[in-house]
Amino acid sequence: MKIVPRTVKGMRDFLPDEMRNRNYLISKFREIFEKFGFEPLETPVMEYSDILTGKYGTDGEKLMYNFKDRAGRDVGLKYDLTVPLARIIAQYTQIIKPFKRYQIQPVYRYDNPQKGRYREFYQCDIDIIGTSSIMADAECLSVCSSILTELGFKNFLIRINNRIFLNTLLSDIGFTDSEKIIVLRLLDKKKKVSSEKLDAEALEKGLNSEYFNNLITLLSESEADPVSFLERLRESGTTDGIKALLDLYSFAISLGVQEQNIKIDLSLARGLDYYTSLVWETEIVEPAIGSIVGGGRYDTLVERFSKEKIPCVGISFGFERICFAMKELSLFPKRKEYSGIFITIFNKDTLHESIYIAYELRKSGIPCELYLDKKKLKQQFKYASRKKFKWVIIIGPDEVASGKAVIRDLENSSEEKVDQSSLIDFFINYK
C-alpha cells in the first residue's frame, strides 16, 4: 500500500518562490535589528516542561505541545521565544547587560489552523535585558515602525497601554486581585468578539456585571482623546502608570514613530501573564488579520529562574501574518520573469570546459546552474525555458577550438559569441 503524501495539520511546505519571499523578509528583519544594535541568538526547539509552564496563562498552556521523551522526561516544544530567553539570561550570567538580542525561529502552538494562523510558525523577536529605562521600550517601538515602513506598510497602528495603570483602575472600580486576571484576559478579547459575547463571558466567569459595565464604559470614553483622559485622571488622583505611558508615547515619537501610527489604547491588556507594565500591539488596516506585532515589559520573568531581579522588555513580530499581508498588498520585490544563467553540456568531449566555466563564474560570485544529466541540447533548452533562465551558455567543439562561448538570451531570442575569458566581465557589466 502506497503512503499518501501529506503535511501534518497546521504545518506547511514552502516551495522555492515562497521561500524567496520568506528569505527576503528575514534578511530585512536582520538588517534593521542589527542597525539598532541587536545581537543574534538561537535556542533549542524543546525545553523542559517546568521551564515553559506557568508563564502563559490558562489559555496559552492549553495550546502547548507537552510530552515525555523516551527517557520519561517532561519536555515541550517552545511556545514563544521570550521564556527561553529568560532561561538563557538566568543560565548564562556572563552575558553583558543591557543585552540587546534578536531571534528568528519557529515556535509551536496546538491552535485551530485558519487563515494566517498555523501550528508551526516563525517569530521574530527583539528584547532588551537589564534596564528599566522607558527609552528601551520606546526603542522597541521605533524598530517596529522602521521595519513596517521599510517593508512598505503605510496604514498601521501601534497601540500602547500600561498594565500598572489598568490594574489600578480595576482596583478603583472594585475588582479583587483574583478577578483582575480574568478581566485582563477578557479585555484582550475586546476587539476580537462582540460586546454581547464579552458580557456573557464576564457573567459566566462570575464577575460583577455593574463593575464590568462601568469599566467598559470608562474605556470607551477614553478612546477619542486618551491623552487628555489620562491627564484628567491624574488630576483626580489616579497616577499609577500614567507618567510611564505618556513618556513612552512621547519618546516613541521622538525616535521616529509617526503620530498617526501610534495611539494610547487603555483597553489593551495583552493576554500573557508575564507582562508587568507597558504593553503594545500593532495592527495593519488592510488586510484585517488582527495583531501582527506585540510585546511589552516583563520585569519579573527572569526571577522565576534566578534570584536576581533583571528588568526586561521586548517585542515579537508575527512573521507569518506579515508574510501573508505583504503578499496581499504585493509588497514583496517582483522577481524578473527571466533571470539566471544556465550552462549546457554539449557532449562528453566538452564536459570539462562547461564544468570549468561554471567553476569560474561561481568563484567570481556569479550564480549559475550546470546541467547534470546526459541529455540532448533540445531537452536541456526545454528545461532552461521552463525554469525561466535568461541566459544559456553553450560550449561545443567549435567553441572549444576557438576559445569562445555562445550566450543565448532566451528572453530576447538572440545570441552572441564571446571569448570564454570575457564571460565574467560580460555578466558583471550586463545592465
Image (tube, grey):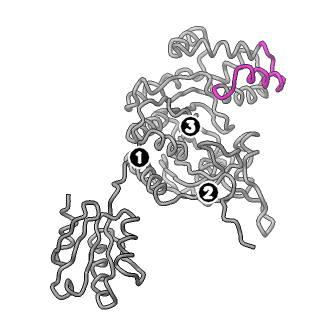
Q: Nearer the viewer, residue 87 or 103?
A: 103
**Which disc, if any, is residue 294?**
3
Say few, some or many: other residues with alpha carbon within 10 Å of mark 1 (under 14 / 14 to 19 / 20 or more): some
Distance in Å between CA atoms under marks 3 and 1: 23 Å
Q: How many marks?
A: 3
The residue positioned 37% from the left and 69% from the top of the image is 384
Is 142 left, or right, of 397 in this rendering?
Answer: right
**Which disc, if any, is residue 365?**
none
Residue under numbered circle 1: 332
Instruction: Pick the quarter of the image with the C terminus.
Output: bottom left
Q: Nearer the viewer, residue 21 or 276?
A: 21
**Which disc, if any, is residue 91?**
2
Where residue 412 sits: x, y (%)?
Answer: 24, 60
Q: Nearer the viewer, mark 3 or mark 2?
A: 3
The residue positioned 49% from the left and 50% from the top of the image is 101
The residue positioned 55% from the left and 55% from the top of the image is 105
